[in-house]
Amino acid sequence: MADSFSLRNVLENFKSCLSDNKEVYIKYYISGWRELVSFMNSLGSVFSFISKDAVSKIQILENFLMGENGTHYLTVQSMVKYELDNELVDLTKRGSHPESGCRTLLRLHRALRWLQLFLESLRTSTEDSKTSVMCSEAYNASLAQHHSWIIRKAAGLAFCALPGRDAFFEVMNAGSHQEVITLLGEALPLISEVYQITEDLYAKNKLLDLP
Ligand code: 1PZ
């Protein structure tokens, strides 16, 4: 529910993502994304083209997790191994597996880099910082390179509709500005760790450019 959103829920999910031996649980990874989507929806309908795409990717992964081969989709590590071992991934061009777990998660993984950069810049921002500028800088340094011109344009337009910094801190619903900043400081290392573990795993298996 949009009105029960809190930044804390997002962070709790990303915290729960890591197993003792540093594997990434898909269940919590997608719950974290669901929370972010509900947050984005509360910002207005300009963002719905973004949340629709995110939701469809979350849904693909959830279907794998709930499906008959669900045990192989417990962690990102087990998913990669299972899909590669069974040739369930289109490696160079889209073919018979256009919606593999690996390529789907890669899209969210790239978006996680955007999130990491954006939240870090929010955390260190000052009163006169603009959310739209922070958001587009984070985007240009991450996701943009994977998007077509038309999507970059649409994203740029959506960023202009972001609430200002004060309102943004309010909708995060995690207390005073100072409390939000503290919470971000605690959470960002966890998000970075989840990102880095996934990045290394994908790099090792040469999966960073999946079509
Ligand atoms: C609060 C501000 C929100 C800004 C979000 C910044 C990200 C902008 C992304 C715009 C892309 C949306 C349209 C869909 C693009 C898809 O083509 C790509 C590639 O997928 P493919 O076509 O290969 O299947 N999809 C993505 O890159 C995934 C994007 C997920 C974005 C989730 C953002 C969630 C933000 C949470 C906000 C706090």
Image (tube, rainbow, N blue to C red):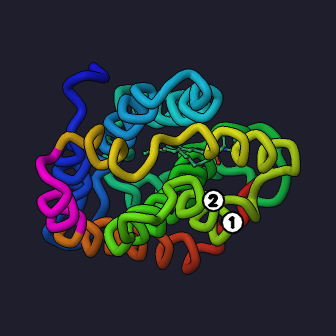
| Magenta-colored stretch includes residue 180 | yes
Quarter of the image for residue 2 reads top left
Residue at coordinates 46% horizontally, 65% vertically from top-left?
129
Residue at coordinates 53% horizontally, 63% vertically from top-left?
134
Q: Position of residue 110 (x, y in %)?
A: 57, 60
Task: Measure the C-alpha gap from mark 1 to mark 2.
Answer: 6 Å
Q: On the rendered structure, is 131 left or right of 73? A: right
Q: Position of residue 5 (x, y in %)?
A: 24, 32
Which image quarter has ligand 1?
A: top right
Secondary structure found at label 1: helix
Q: Which mark is residue 52?
A: none
Residue that badge 2 annotates: 136
Residue at coordinates 77% horizontally, 37% vertically from top-left?
96
Q: Which residues are magenta?
A: 174-184
Q: What's under tag 1, amino acid-wise?
A: Asn
Q: What's under tag 2, amino acid-wise?
A: Ser
Using the image, determine if residue 107 lies above or below residue 44.
Answer: below
CB under 8 Å between discs 1 and 2: yes
Query: Can residue 184 be seen in the rendering of this structure?
Result: yes
Density class for disc 1 (Cα within 10 Å; few <14, some 14-19, many ≥20) is some
